[in-house]
Image (spheres, rainbow, N blue to C red):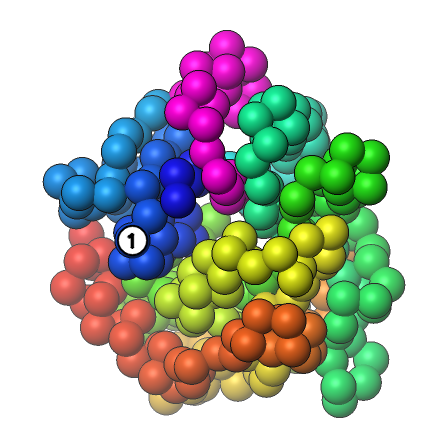
Amino acid sequence: MKVLVTGGAGFIGRWVVKQLLDDGHDVWVLDNLANGRHSNIAEFMHHTGFREFVTGDIKDKKVLRDVFSNKYDICYHLAASINVQDSIDDPGTTFANDVEGTFNVLEECRRNNAKMVFMSTCMVYDRAASPEGIDEAWRTKPASPYSGSKIAGENMVLSYFHTYGLPVVVIRPFNTYGPFQKSSGEGGVISIFIKKKLRGETLNIYGDGTQTRDLLYVTDCARFVAQAGYSDRVDGEIVNAGLGRDISVNELARLICEEPDRIKHIPHIHPQSEIPKLLCNYGKAKNLLGWEPAVSLEEGIKRTAEWISVNDMK
């Protein structure tokens, strides 16, 4: 198939591009490099299935019109503002990217009858309240402008399914981590903790550390994202993906760094947007897509640490 990945030079986008290429598709990437990095996809540039990298913004309708002249079968829409604190400090930018930008991409999908796979987030949910975890029917809670913008984007995407019959699917991966994720302040907690451990620095935990996360290794996430585009069984649906196991940030820090004196608690910078318990129920993905995670948390941390030690210790 002919496939476009918006945000394809980002962390998850990079792995989705790899999965699509491995599956034999022709892939185009659109990214404004605000979050993504050209180096993330440099190894694919000479792949026979990699067609073009376009530096451009989803808020630019002319750029989108030109890019969509390739007549894609599927658009994996991953381009977004993704940082919670940034959305609190500057909600307008997050709204423009995650709502207005999504609308622009949707319109091009509608004009070209291209299926859209919309990357949402587990951050739209309220806290888990049972051992079964959060399924797709669980209540949402827009605890930050980021999650509010994602919920708005989801609703717009699903409206195109109901109004125009456009094939779409909303996907909500839980906390994804792995190689190529940034280990700076806006990166993922695992990457940040690993890099601090390797540098001999203190691992800082926001709040009391009892908040839990369901951590999904990035190759499992990319496989889920790709499969959501391939199957019409999930058209018009919202689908979760996660490990199905949560761990507190305190336990995670101890798992990564076995020296308690290097773990410190600091005041939370945005406690109002914290979700106390995130635990994924991925039964719908298993039933409709035959998907389930293959990489354990311990194995994923090992692979990530090996990659960081070689590639990200500047």
Q: In screen coordinates, is 275 left or right of 117?
A: right
Q: In screen coordinates, is 220 left or right of 109?
A: left
* Percent position of residue 148, x then y: 76, 43
Amino acid type assigned to the residue bearing label 1 in the image: Gly
Secondary structure found at label 1: loop
Which image quarter is the N terminus in?
top left
* Percent position of residue 93, x then y: 62, 27
Asked whether 197 or 52 is in front, the reply is: 52
- Most distant residue in the top direction: 62
> Is residue 55 in sight in this rendering?
yes
Image quarter of residue 210: bottom right
**156 relative to 135, above or below:** above
Q: Which residue is mark 1?
A: 24
The residue shown at (21%, 73%) is 306
Tell me which segment is drawn in magenta: 56-78
Asked whether 173 or 229 is in front, the reply is: 229
Asked whether 188 or 271 is in front, the reply is: 188
Asked whether 178 or 267 is in front, the reply is: 178
**51 relative to 311, above or below:** above
Residue 64 covered by magenta stretch:
yes
The residue shown at (31%, 41%) is 26
The residue shown at (77%, 33%) is 164
